[in-house]
Image (spheres, rainbow, N blue to C red):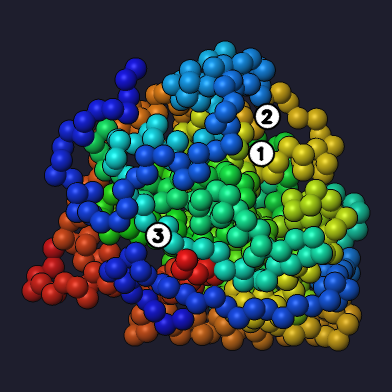
Amino acid sequence: MSSGNLVPKNSPDPAQRFKSEKPFPAQPPKPGLDEEILWHKCPVCKELTFIKHFARNLKVCPHCNTPNRLRWNERLNYLLDPGSFVELNSDLVGADPLQFQTRTESYARKLQDTRRKTGLNDGLVSGYGRVRGQPLAVAVADFTFMGASMGSVFGEKLVRLAEFAIKNRLPLLTISNSGGARMHEGLFSLMQMAKTTAALAKLGQAQLPHIALLVDPCYGGVTASYTMVADVILAEPGALIGFAGPRVIEQTTRQSLPQGFQTAEFLLDHGMLDQVVERKNLPSHLADLLGLLKVKPLTFKQAFDFTPAFQKSFVAPEVGN
Amino acid sequence: MSTTAIDPVVERVGVITSPLPVAPVPVEDTWQKVKLARHPERPHTHDYISRLFSGYIELHGDRRFGDDQALIGGLACFEGRNVVVMGQQKGKDTRDNIKRNFGMPCAEGYRKALRLFRLGEKFGFPIICFIDTPGAYPGLQSEERGVAQAIAENLLVLAALRVPVIATIIGEGGSGGALAIGLADRVLMLENSIYSVASPEASAAILWHDASLASEAATSMKVAAPQILQMGLIDEVIQEPDGGAHTNPSESAGLLKAALLRNLEELEFETGETNGGIDGLLEKRYWKFRSMGAWQQA
Ligand SMILES: [Zn+2]
């Protein structure tokens, strides 16, 4: 297994057209608190792993195979060709449309604190890059930013990325883990479900593939919108995925839930996703999928019919094709 | 909203200014609204269907698993035109509520809705949706059968459905379970209805792990119809009789009918061949939701 370090094969690709913006940072924006900690204690099997071995094992517990949560940049480091990622729209920040304020909590304040702590402006990072030489648009959620909850910025960035993918004929990979909609933006957050899914309907009409990778945990509005309408849905082993959380279900229904409820394997058994893929196999697996779901260039007729904007930018031919 | 063309420069498309801050409402007033929206005597979907439509034929089942009584719908005639009508259905009493699962559909309810959307599209019938649910059912069976996928698929299909769609929140509009039949060309709300990202109780549980703070959650999330209109997330607030819809169901139905008819006639006019047709309507529908959000440039 020597993924991640292959030299990109075919250089004249669509992603070559964009040579701007900042390069993918080699280091996390904030190195994290566990710098001095030498051992990782697995939350599942409680076994200890030397931190360097743990990192070399892609932060998967070598004893029980539980994948640990990853920051956005760790995730992309493990997945994309080195140095290939270029971020888009990183400057969008939440606007607190409700002026959300309770006795104990202020959203504006919380946003400010979280931005400082995480080095991110919101819970979704979007851009483009390559997996084993194949270009793609990619969005990755970072759970450390308010549980990667979906609010206006999350939705807007995802929609801009889908539109970017359409414009540049790139496949789209979304990597989602999220607590659901962001309560602090109220109904604005709910509407992001409509907005993102509508954008993916457009991506589908443009015959571009959307691959969704669900990682632990993925709930609520994110599961019930753009992720579940992907052409291919993948998940990491053991990832918890669902609509309502187990606590809510137990409180509402007093049902006792079966073992393994809402794990990736449970969803696979119930026909809700395509494959459970181990972290170390993801780059090759994605590359294989992208190879099969080859992006077809638009025919003139399709380009012409596609949107009014396209129609305006072309001179109408004498005889339509 | 008049923009219909996609700007070729996607990275800069649709920069939308933050909406004006919505005026706060005292906790008691908000909770009063929530109680009105949930009033047991408040007219529910079936009451409006029987008052507003003629020749209603209920259609049952999702053709995949079962017939969810928490979401009903079928074919009907509305002021001289055939339509598909549907909505979440709460019960009239405890027994009915158990049958209706308190208006909380499972996956099969949303798949019934999906089947009805497609039926309407096939025959060119407008879709009229009544939203009245605390949310999709949070249960084992619901999860097993993929309620999240059912909601997501409805959103995907509604985004491109080639007939006019009007959704009205008549009582409670809670979470994805409401939105699953709410991605519409026109979204209306009755004056005393509420619309929220999650039910007030669920929101409080998510925010503070304490469902008893529901009134505080509802207040800070601004769930009342006039506030949501101010945010620009719905098109119209429909007046109710003094004291709420339950005090005079027939007057309430009359007001709802007038609003539905006016909006439907406008949409029919817009979809006329000389006014952009269905493709124009779909572009507008896309941009309606595409524009929803509030952010700033750091
Ligand atoms: Zn372990």
Disc nearer the start of the sequence (2/3):
3
Mark closer to the observer (1, 2): 2
Disc 1, SS: helix
Q: Nearer the viewer, residue B229 or B272?
A: B229
Quarter occupied by residue B29: bottom right
Residue A257, position as x, y percentages in the image = 76, 30
Task: State the SS at label 2.
Answer: loop
Does mark 3's beta carbon lie closer than 8 Å to ligand 1? no
Q: What residue is pinned by disc 3?
A: A89
> Could one spot residue B46 in this view of the protein?
no
Which chain's residue wears label 1?
B
**Residue nearest the viewer, comparing A136 with A117:** A117
- Chain bearing tag 2 is A
Residue kind at label 1, given as amino acid type: Glu
Give the class, few, some or many, for how many residues have Cα within 10 Å of label 2's Cα (few <14, many ≥20): some
Residue of label 2 = A261
Residue B194 percent coordinates (x, y) = 74, 70
- Is A189 above or below relative to B146? below
- Are callouts 1 and 3 both on one chain? no
How far apart are labels 1 and 2 at the CA level?
9 Å
- Residue B109 or B51: which is nearer the viewer? B109
- Marks 2 and 3, how far apart at CA: 37 Å
Asked if residue A266 lies left or right of residue B12, the reply is right
Which residue is more in the foreground, A85 or B224? A85
Which structural element holds mark 3? loop
At a point 14% along the width and 74% down the height, the residue shown is A316
Tell me the residue that label 1 is attached to. B143
Mark 2 belongs to which amino acid? Phe
Query: Mark 3 is on which residue type?
Result: Asn
Q: Are marks 1 and 2 in contact (CB under 8 Å)?
A: yes
Depth check, mark 1 against mark 3: the one in front is: 3
For the point 64% across and 65% down, the residue is A108
